[in-house]
Amino acid sequence: MNYSLTILILLIPFATFLFNGLVGMKFKPIVSGLIGTIGLGVITLLAYLTAWQYFFVDGMVGGSFPKVIAMSMEWLRLTDALRIQIGILLDPISVMMLVVITTVSFMVHIYSLGYMKGEKGFERFFSFLSLFSFSMLGLVIATNIFQMYIFWELVGVSSFLLIGFYYSKDSAVAASKKAFIVTRFADLGFLIGILLLSYFTQTFDFKVLTGTDQSIFAQTAGVSFLGMSVMTWAALLIFMGGAGKSAMFPLHIWLPDAMEGPTPVSALIHAATMVVAGVFLVARMFPVFYFQAPDALTVISYVGGFTSLFAAAIACTQYDIKRVLAFSTLSQIGYMMLALGVSGYGGHEGVGYMASMFHLFNHAMFKALLFLGAGSIIHAVHSNVMQDMGGLRKYLPITHITFLIACLTIAGVPFLSAFFSKDEILVAAYEHNKLLFAVEFLVAGLTAFYMFRLYFNIFWGKETHYHHTPHESPKTMTIPLMILALGSVFAGYIPFSKLVTSDSMPFESHMDFGIAIPSVLIGLTGILIAWILYKKESKIPERISKSLGGFYQAVYHKFYIDEVYMFITKKIIFNCIARPVAWFDRHIVDGTMNGIGWITVTSSRNIKGMQSGNLPQYGMVFVLSAIILVLIFSFLI
Amino acid sequence: MDIASFNLMRNELILVGIVLILLIAEIFTKNENKHKLISMGTILFGVATLINFLPLPEGQLFGGSFQTTRITVFMKSILNMGGFIVFLQSFTWLKREENNGKIGEFFILIISTLIGMNFMISSGDFLMMYIGLELATIPMAALAAYEKFSEKSAEAGIKLILTSALSSGILLYGLSFIYGTTGSIYFADVVSNVGNNSLQTFGFVFFVAGMAFKISLVPFHLWTADVYEGAPVNVTAYLSVVSKGAAVFIFMIILYRVFSSITAVWEPLLYTLAVATMTIGNLFALRQENLKRFMAFSSIAQAGFILLGIMQGGQLGMTTVVYFMLIYVFTNLAAFGVISAISEQTGKENISDYTSLYKTNPKLSLILLLSMFSLAGIPPVAGFFGKFFLFTAAGAKGYYILVLIAVLNATVSLYYYLRVVKAMLIDKSDNPIATFKTPWPMRISLLICVAGIFFIGFASFIYQYISNISFGIN
């Protein structure tokens, strides 16, 4: 039971951050890159050792995995009851997150050695990456909600710095600002939620909050505001923070724009780690939500469900490959949120919780792979847009194969990792809410469709005339792709129901074929439609001319089906659903945010006349104000 | 009362001593050696600052007119540190040709105001408090008009003296009512006679109005921006940090010690002022171009946040306010240090002049970035902790709506603080401020500020210490 080395998991990235940030520019760029990468390699190893020891050496105590406080010290005493600790908490989800973050971050570090080579500010990039890894790791091992909030904001700052890395690009700058301000707006709710929760329970500590002793919530009984109990308010406000970071509708608007950052950053922050912080937050506080604020949980499930559908619909219409992946990320996080929302507590009831964490783990692998693959493609053709691609399978064999594996995984093809976790999510949804189940079932099909639309457009289809022949990326970039591809294939065989569960007690989960088979079928249908529409799109005219003879009927028939598919997808789905949804997103949701800014600026312009520089006027205002205050306070009170 | 008990006035006496030494030194220094007074004054003051950290027994002098407690000593130390940093930042500016004849003046005037503030904080009756307040104000006007050939500086001086005369009048008027209804000016006697009396409330509101002027609370803030803009940068820095800090401290002490029985009156009053101050301060700050004006409105908005802590009324409230002020000294002076360094080098003071500063002067721009983050309250820099504890204090008293307004305002403030960051790091300029080397006293001052910004938030023993020595309404 000794986890004293876990503190190094935090200290090493912090040290590499300081080194690269302060003296990195004095050395050759590759030095700072290597220092960052080696540091990350060491903590990846440490994280694996910690996980090994936690799950398999120490194992369960009394039938469940304990919450181990590996380190803790008292930091502040606000009142005698309300104290703030700073420390390290190890439990199944935090250990799992350690593994996810270090793995993906390590891969991204290696990859960036190649991808960012020759970029200006190489050492700055690596120091920001270290800062991000440090804050994200600090977030997941926090022992209390206050410590978590500090790292939460630090994560936001490092994300801001990384999105705006190409600071000479206006769009990157705008995007980083948007991301920072939208998430800060959400954190406002989070902060109030924390204050409410701590005021009523007199504790910040996760171990106490999520423990079995429910008496700490005694004070909240009967307190309500605007018809909702105070715990529902606290839970919803805390979820607001989570929704901001995890880009849930309607706070999702920053994520697609955040794709302006360097691609490895998108892989690390906006796919695998930071954006799932909201899911992690809800999972961390799950017993509080489940026992004290079940209504909030219902809200979470609907927000998750809606976001996943909405984002999947938009993903079908995008041409920028990173944006397709961004919307796909939104959709998958929606899945995870939904699974948490419909989950029960304990045993098989808690299958949603387990599935959510399971999917988070798998998603980190395959989505990081997709983004890094996209980075490799962009690196080869110097464009983000699908129209500039096509036929790339010949030039980028490794990228092609690994990208295909990731696409198959996300589409839910059997025996790849997401197949298992998606099935569990659908089982959880089916047991608790049939409507949400139907939505998720549909999204599974859409997901397969848009991913393969992407895949066929990039690697098959008509070949664009490239200025110079695209060539495969260097080893530093392809090796992480291969490792992550292995992860996407085999992560599904980790027995999550034995390790990461809502009450930390293992339970038996088994495949529900009644759900698995239809979900695989709808996935395959999606792939098929994409195949028909996009793989051979450029060859259709050629085929028609060839088949004008005896095969006319068959070709006609195929043409007809094509048209129907075209009509259904392009005319009905795109125009009637996806376009309005995208419009709504662009105009109403964005517009509201812009409107708030406009009101602030206008009102500040209108009161500017008050500040005239005219001294007699100042004196008059002063005396009048004093008199008015006297009138108010001596006679009205 | 023996001679040893004068030890209670340690800081005040040492400061008076320094003023006398400087006066004499000024006479005996040849014109070409005048600049040596800068180092001399700074070193002497630095020693005084250090001495004040030594422990001091609690006690009172002059029949209770002057009181020393551990919290007042700590407050004085905060002000001393602020003064010391301002001195360090003034080196280059004072070495200018046109300031040669009045270097001594600068030190003497600033230290005089500090003496006034010290007496004010330690006061045990309204008379001592008022004298201290005036001693802290009148030299301030001379300081604002320090660059007497600059029209703006002269205007700032005149504006400050006229408006503060008005506010002192109002304050005295209020105090006279309090004296009239309670029959005493001693805090200890007044407190037992304060009650639900509308004449008293009348006097009390006027007293609050007078104090609100010093702290620049809306609607008594109108002088702030003009004076901050016109005065020399270093004087503005001093005004926004030390002057304001002293006024906040004495205001809080009097509310807690004298008006503890009428919290029902001052809580809604402060509530109103807090909401107005945060909101109006923020709205004005949004559109400022001149950095000194910008900092003026930012400091107004920050004063609104401070009221949240004061309203808590207990030990927690005082702790959070003192802690916030401590952080605020380092944070604000870091910003003013950078503004002063750049203004000294180039004469530029507008946000738009700062575009691409990161490329030419990365260290300065990073310091300004840290300071802006700290003012905006972004973890993990100290400003976040300061603000968080203020909010906790108000939350603990049950002012949820107020906390909500404050958090909203803090979010709005993020917008304008980031504007500065954006200009420095992100916007492109064909003609950025050229790279220059900051003089060493400025570097030391900025180093102290940065260390403060990072360190104080995480050094919990400081918070614990303040908590131990604070008091609240029982």
Image (spheres, helix red, strand yellow):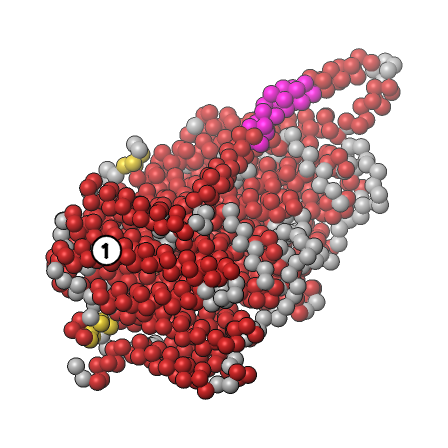
Q: Which of A609/B218 is in front? A: A609
Q: Is residue A504 left or right of residue B180?
A: right
Q: Which of B371/B39 is in front? A: B39
Whether residue B116 is visible here, answered yes or no, is yes
Q: Quadrant of residue B18?
A: bottom left
Whether residue A50 is visible here, answered yes or no, is no
Where is B455 relative to A492, above or below?
Answer: below
**Residue at x 48% of width, y 76% of height:** B103
Q: Quadrant of residue A377?
A: top right
- Label 1 crowd (10 A; few <14 / some 14-19 / many >=20): some
Q: Secondary structure at mark 1?
A: helix
The quarter of the image holding the N terminus of chain B is bottom left
Reply yes or no: does residue A573 show up in magenta: yes
**Residue at x 40% of width, y 81% of height:** B23
- Report the magenta stretch's main SS: helix
**Residue at x 20% of width, y 45% of height:** A634
**Count of marks overlaid on the render:** 1
Residue A168: x %, y % from top left: 67, 51
Q: Is residue A551 left or right of residue A31?
A: right
Q: Which of B79/A300 is in front? A: B79
The quarter of the image holding the C terminus of chain B is bottom left
Reply yes or no: does residue A240 show up in magenta: no
Mark 1: amino acid: Tyr
Range drawn in magenta: A566-586
